[in-house]
Amino acid sequence: MRERILDAAEYCLVESGYNSRLHAVIAERAGLSRPTVYKYVGDQSAIFEALFQREISRFFAVLDPVLRGHDQLQAGFVDCVVFAVGYARRHALLQKGLRDDPAVVVPWFTVRAKPFIEVGAEFLVPHFERMLTPEQLASVSPRVVSEWAFRLIASLITTEGDVDTADEEALRQFVGGLPAVMFVPSADARVG
């Protein structure tokens, strides 16, 4: 029943947007009563959260084989970010929300992101642990790498910048170049 309601909610949000009388249109689309929609998914905020949770689970299912194909962190990290940004750009519901109702969607990638960072860590940490050498594991936390990936993906999805995120090669070069920028020796180290 819950999946039926969420399917209807996804359809209604893509068709009508985030500000419609959501429960009424979901109930009509699903062939249920409004009280049944409330019973199984709750208020509008709960519907959005349930849809985000479901979509993240779906995303991880398709990301898993991408990450399993890597045994080195940098290549795995770059592919993870590039894949996630591409997936988000093709996701009709997410794009509709970002375009038409960013005030509803963007908080899930910013001030309300903590639960998704946690879910992401549960999924990503074992992959990143596998990709790190024992020496790297001694100095790098896979959980930090996971959170960094989420924050980078969220930023690339929600904000425009100089990199064209629709151009996979440009995005790959941008993300692949980040470690080099992060580990530029300090001015003191270059002088000596």
Image (tube, helix red, strand yellow):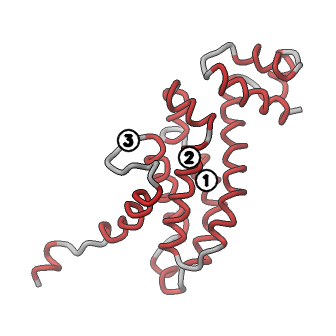
Vertically, is 105 above or below 32? Answer: below
Q: Give the side of residue 126 with respect to residue 72, left or right.
A: right
Q: Where residue 49 sits: x, y (%)? A: 67, 35
Q: Residues within 10 Å of mark 2 (few under 14, many from 20)?
A: few
> Which quadrant, please, contains the C terminus?
bottom left
Instruction: Please determine whether, in this image, residue 183 is positioned above or below residue 38.
Output: below
First in residue order: circle 3 vs circle 1:
1
Mark seen at residue 118: 1
- Picture coordinates of residue 133, whole percent (x, y): 53, 84
Determine the image quadrant of residue 112: top right
Q: CA distance from mark 1 to mark 2?
A: 6 Å
Q: Secondary structure at mark 1?
A: helix
Q: Quadrant of residue 32?
A: top right
Q: Percent position (x, y) of residue 100?
A: 52, 24
The residue indicated by pointer 2 is: 114
Up-down relation of residue 11 to residue 63 (above or below): above
